[in-house]
Each structure stands twice: as C-alpha cells, then as structure tokens.
Image (cartoon, rainbow, N blue to C red):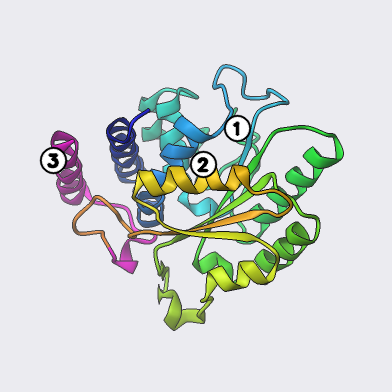
Amino acid sequence: MDNIELKKIANEVRKGIVTATHSAKSGHPGGSLSAADIYTYLYFEEMNIDPEKPKDPERDRFVLSKGHTAPGYYSVMAQRGYFPVAELETLRHTGARLQGHPSMNYLPGIDMSSGSLGQGISAAVGMALGAKIQNKDFRVYTLLGDGECEEGQVWEASMFAGAKKLDNLVVIVDNNNLQIDGEITEVNNPYPLDKKFEAFNFHVINIDGHDFDQIRAAFKEAKETKGMPTAIIAKTVKGKGVSFMENQASWHGTAPNDEQYAQAMADLERIGESL
C-alpha cells in the first residue's frame, strides 16, 4: 500500500475518532488523533492479522497500553473490518461493545484489556516472552503515551524485556509532548526517552510519527533487529488533523460539541480532498 492510500485511511480513522467522541459526549480525541498514522500502519501494513480470524494463534498481537485512546483503536479496527464503521457512534454507550477503555471481553480482535497506565506494556512483554517459550513466530506491538512513561511500571517491564532479549517486541511511544495536565516536561519530565530505553537494552529509533516513509523504515528496522526489543519514539502532534485541537492539552479528554464536530469534520474533509 502506498503512502497516499495510507494517508487516506488515516484520515478516515481521524473522522471516526471525531464521530465517536462527539456521539459519546466524552472520550479522548487528542491522543487518538496523534496516533492515527501509527494505528493505520500497524493495522494495514505491519501486523499479520485477519479480521475474519481474530483468535488465530499465529496472529501478531497488539496491546494499547494508553487505553484511554480507545477511540483511535476502535476507529482503525472498524476501517480494517473488525466491525461496522457505524458502530463507532455507540462509543461509551450503556451496553455497547465500544467501552471507554478496550475490553477483550466485548470485542473480538482486542488482545488485552487496558487502561491502567503501565499495565499494557507489561502484558505485551508477557505475550512476547510466551511466544519465545512456545517457539512461536508472532510479534507483539504495544503503544504507549509519553505521559504514561512517567509510570514506574513501564520501566520495570522494559528492564525485563531487555534482560530477556525479546526481539519479537516493539514498543511505540506516541510522543506528542502533552498529557492531561499540560506539557510532560512541566508535569514530570520523562525525557530523554530514547536514552532511557537504550539503558534497558532496547534498540531505539526516533521518527516523525506522521511520516509514513519513516514509519515504514522504523518497523522494517525493528524486524531486522535481533537479540533485543525495539522502541520506536514517534514524535507527533496531539489533536493532529483538527485545526483547533492541535497541540492543545485541553483536548486530551474533551469531546467536541455539535459546532466543534462540524468544524473538525470540515477540516478532515479538506485534508481528504487534498490527497
């Protein structure tokens, strides 16, 4: 799939994020939008998955460690064919499969329930170790927030992954520099992220998380890396694609109202038309 096709899909993923959070009147659009290109590449290019066989034991696994960005996760799953796109409008509704944080009990295709920050990467490390023990070839991918990297559990899991040389594990950090309370440097500075992962025996790749050439090259490099896990630090823009949400911490966990929804969709329509 070429970059233009990927950009078009990512734009549809962003529309789904805006639609879902508007319908729910709650949710987390900012960090969902920043990760949309990563989600798109994982689900349409990188991972060995089949929506028709969501429990295939040979499939690659994905764990959304920053589980609050479920709107982005659900939106890419819908685009990939796991469930109808129209179901995005049920986000956070009582009885819906699309709860505020991902639950493997409700929706086929979710490999791990998540939401409590730091725990997702720990589960992913366990899956990667399990693959090694069972001599399985599947790979494990987990997406973290940069604010999430303030959690000590992230580094306990990373220490273990490095010590066990889990080269079937790829940790992606959505580095949009903002968390609920503002810039991560002002809340509890986790930088330098790359040097920290290197200290735990990771192969580290720094990229622009909106550049599909760089994304493609990073995942290729990760597959070719042997004897150690890979961390991809993806520099992104919180709220990417929606003019009034970009680089605004206030959109971490705020849903658009009717007027904002219309403006956001108009922004994304313009982007789609330009592709």
Residue type beneath disc 3: Arg
Marks 3 and 2: in contact by CB < 8 Å? no
Q: Which mark is residue 167?
A: none
Report the Cα–Cα distance between label 2 and label 1: 9 Å
Q: Is residue 44 above or below residue 141?
A: above
* Residue at image mark 1: 106
Residue sticking out furthest to the top: 52
Identify the image quadrant of residue 199: bottom right
**SS class, disc 1:** loop
* Residue at image mark 3: 270
Q: Is residue 137 above or below residue 117?
A: above
Q: Is residue 120 above or below residue 106?
A: below
Q: Is residue 248 magenta?
A: yes
* Residue at image mark 2: 99
Count residues near mark 3 (Cα–Cα under 10 Å), then give few for <14, some for 14-19, many for 20+.
few
Report the Cα–Cα distance between label 2 and label 3: 30 Å
Residue beneath the point at 66% across and 61% down: 202
Q: Is residue 239 left or right of residue 83?
A: left
Closer to viewer: mark 1 or mark 3:
3
Q: Is residue 208 left or right of residue 106?
A: left
Q: Return the disc, 2 or 1, that comes first in the chain's sequence.
A: 2
Residue beneath the point at 47% across and 41% down: 73
Which residue range is magenta in the image?
247-275
Residue beneath the point at 67% across and 24% down: 55
Residue 163 position within the rendered picture, expressed as x and y whole percent measured from the top left:
79, 61
